Image (cartoon, coloured by chain):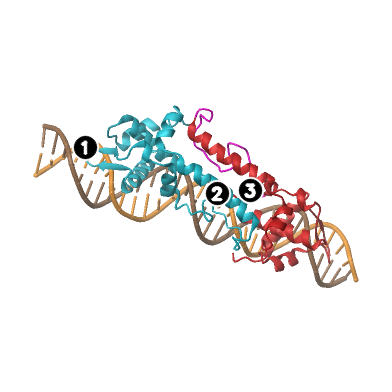
Chain colours: A red, B cyan, C brown, D orange
Amino acid sequence: MLITRSTDYAVRALKYLAEKGKEASAAELTQKLKIPRAFMRKIMQLLGKNGFVESRKGPGGGFLLLKKPEEIFLIELIKLFQGQVCLNECVFKKKVCVNKSSCFLSKKLGEIEEYAYLVLSRINLKEIMEGGRSYGETQNN
Amino acid sequence: MLITRSTDYAVRALKYLAEKGKEASAAELTQKLKIPRAFMRKIMQLLGKNGFVESRKGPGGGFLLLKKPEEIFLIELIKLFQGQVCLNECVFKKKVCVNKSSCFLSKKLGEIEEYAYLVLSRINLKEIMEGGRSYGETQNN
DNA sequence: CTAAAAGATACTAGAGTGGTATCATTATGT
DNA sequence: ACATAATGATACCACTCTAGTATCTTTTAG
């Protein structure tokens, strides 16, 4: 899949932090974004380890956004939560044929991959926040 | 994933049948294409049920291609072996957000999806056969 | 010192993919 | 008629990935 729930939750959480402009705890994120708590915590930990947010323990602690929204690109989050995006190999996890250079089908799939990679590389959090007011504000699953 | 092994095997089998121009048994396909026999049989059965090939039981029986290579589109095989391809919903199985109309991210993912769908819809077996001589002739996995 | 937070880590459930196995059915050739 | 060679139908298995849970430890505010 192009985007998994983990990546999506990460985007929602970062968006929330960016809009709030202040620290927020996992409990708050859980409540506001209606994401399972334990899952949210795991996601925040990974975001913390990778420099997207800073964490503070203890009462009143929580997570603080470390980057500007325009510096956070979707492709980074996809790589972080769904694994390395290696062009012409695993973006869509195709295992089609060994003769990549000469195989027509592989070339066509590669084109799709490149297009996807390009689009995903350009999307940043700022755009997501501006482009769709509703993103992350409602959800059913 | 964009293309699974089942779909890939189906393409290889159809390509083989098209090149041979005559009936071939599952045993022959298995041997020539180096695809696990039981798996190949399952794939051929599905191709048979869906009008791509005709099957003949009994000694000397096998499978005969029913369509012209240029009439077999990759998207059909993908739908058959990987499920319905519903635009803006399941091509990449994204479950991102409910507000599809207003969500920026969903729109962008939809663009990728559309592009992929378009490319896949245009690829037919004839092109695959002509475009890459090596397709299906070697494989390691 | 207590409680509230995050850190670390291990575990579980369900779905999808890739593949196997078995028995039933049909057709061929002698 | 009969043995055999083929497909049809169907059930099952192993592995991986995603989504989510649970538990125990560490840090820190008041």
Question: Which residue is painted at 58% across and 36% down in the image?
Answer: A88
Residue B140 appears in the picture as rendered: no
The segment highlighted magenta reads: A81-102
Circle 1 residue = B59
Question: Which residue is painted at 33% across and 43% down in the image?
Answer: B52
- Mark 2 vs mark 3: in front: 2
The foreground one among A109 and A94 is A109
Q: Does the magenta stretch mainly form a helix, a strand or a loop?
A: loop
Q: In the image, residue A8 lies at what x, y percent?
A: 65, 56
Question: Which residue is painted at 51% across and 31% down in the image?
Answer: A98
- Number of numbered callouts drawn: 3
Circle 3 residue = A82
Left or right position of A103 against A62: left
Q: Upstream in the sequence, badge 1 or badge 2?
A: 1
Circles 2 and 3: CB atoms closer than 8 Å: no
Circle 2 residue = B113
Left or right position of C16 against B40: right
Chain ID for label 3?
A: A
Rendering quarter of residue A126? bottom right
- Identify the element where label 3 is drawn: helix
Circles 1 and 3: CB atoms closer than 8 Å: no
Q: At label 3, which amino acid type do we have? A: Gln
Q: CA distance from mark 1 to mark 2?
A: 45 Å
